[in-house]
Amino acid sequence: MSAVFVQILLLLLFISLGYIMSKLGKVDNRHSKLLSSLGFYIFLPANVFKTFSNNFTVEYLTQKYPLVLISAVFVVVMFIAGKFIAKALTKDPYTRRVYEYSMISSNYGYVGYTLAQAIFGDTMLLNVMMFAVPLSIYTYSMGYCSLTKNKMSLKKLMGPVNIALVAGALVGLLKPYTVSFFVNYLPGFVEFIKPVGQPLLALIESFLNKAQGAMGPISMLLTGMVISEYSLKDMLSQKSVYIISFLRLIVIPCAVCGLMLLIGLKEFVTPVLIILALPCGLNTIVFPKLIGEDCRPGAALACVTSVLCCVTIPLCLWLFGAY
């Protein structure tokens, strides 16, 4: 359990550094946009592609496909329940959308993947990413459209993260058959390409490893920098934020994982718990910025849940025997 606390505290340290640097004027809004772009277009897709291409096999898919089904059911149930909960908490239509989104989608891309990798390793990271597939589809389609007041379209699904996921999954599934084909039927081509192919593959692997290592610190610095743009007093004075935070960090993960234990899905509890016990993400800030909407509800949720999760994540992992 000490490893969990260490990783959580490291994340909090980077968040604090981002917050302090921003408040001191050493970084500004331009830098946060740069970090956001680097994370969204380079580091996060590289992380997703590396994990899927190295670990996603036919055997893995046949064993772990229930993770996708569980996640899809969760998205549908929370999409319906979230509307009633948000309506009871606020009369403002847009704040309702922020609350609805926050109860479905956590900060899985930045915090979740980083924690899973650091504490449990690549296998658990892949499990977490599998569970996040329906969440990712929701986030960059219906979630994005809800927070930016846009209409749904196929183009919304073709973001860099989803493209990296599909590409990595295809590479992982086809790799054994591709290698076998070239070795058995085109051995001459294999020997011809080896002097160039091996260094190239090593270069690509090195790039993906470096990108994966940069993901955690950059995402946490960005979290701190974004939170610093808003008044702590205003963010911490919203009662509804604490209700959503309690649901996000305690009620939702415990209810879902408790139900999974009751119906005999114990082997899938840990990756589900890692995702559902996470703080609210930054998209409730980033997406509203695109249309000039009030970002304070999203910033308040990101701030409060990012601090409280230092206690609630280890507590949930201990409660369900996940670590």
Image (cartoon, grey):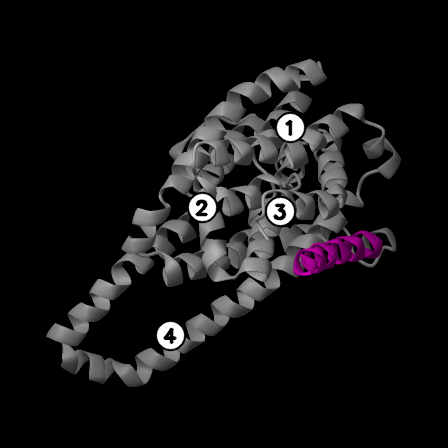
Q: Secondary structure at mark 1?
A: helix
Mark 2 and mark 4 in contact? Answer it, CB < 8 Å: no
The residues bearing labels 2 and 4 have C-alpha atoms spaced at a distance of 34 Å
Callout 4, which amino acid? Leu
Q: Please tell me which residue lies in front, 215 or 262.
A: 262
Q: Is residue 41 above or below residue 154?
A: below
Q: Can you tell which mark lies on residue 243? A: none
Q: Which residues are magenta?
A: 1-21
Callout 1, which amino acid? Val
Callout 3, which amino acid? Leu
The residue depicted at 52 percent of the width and 36 percent of the height is: 139
Q: Earlier in the sequence, mark 1 or mark 2?
A: 1
Q: Earlier in the sequence, mark 2 or mark 3?
A: 2
Mark 3 and mark 4 in contact? Answer it, CB < 8 Å: no
Residue 95 percent across, percent down from the top left:
68, 23
Instruction: Please name the residue that numbered disc 1 is placed on.
Output: 98
Looking at the image, can residue 159 be seen? no
Residue 203 percent across, percent down from the top left:
44, 76
The residues bearing labels 1 and 3 have C-alpha atoms spaced at a distance of 27 Å
Instruction: Please name the residue that numbered disc 4 is placed on.
Output: 201
Residue 318 percent across, percent down from the top left:
64, 47
The residues bearing labels 3 and 4 have C-alpha atoms spaced at a distance of 37 Å
- Figure quadrant of residue 20: bottom right
- Figure quadrant of residue 241: top right
The residue depicted at 45 percent of the width and 58 percent of the height is: 123
Badge 2: residue crowd in 10 Å (few <14, some 14–19, many ≥20): few
Magenta region's main secondary structure? helix
Q: Secondary structure at mark 2?
A: helix
Q: Earlier in the sequence, mark 2 or mark 4?
A: 4
The residue depicted at 76 percent of the width and 44 percent of the height is: 307
The residue depicted at 11 percent of the width and 73 percent of the height is: 185
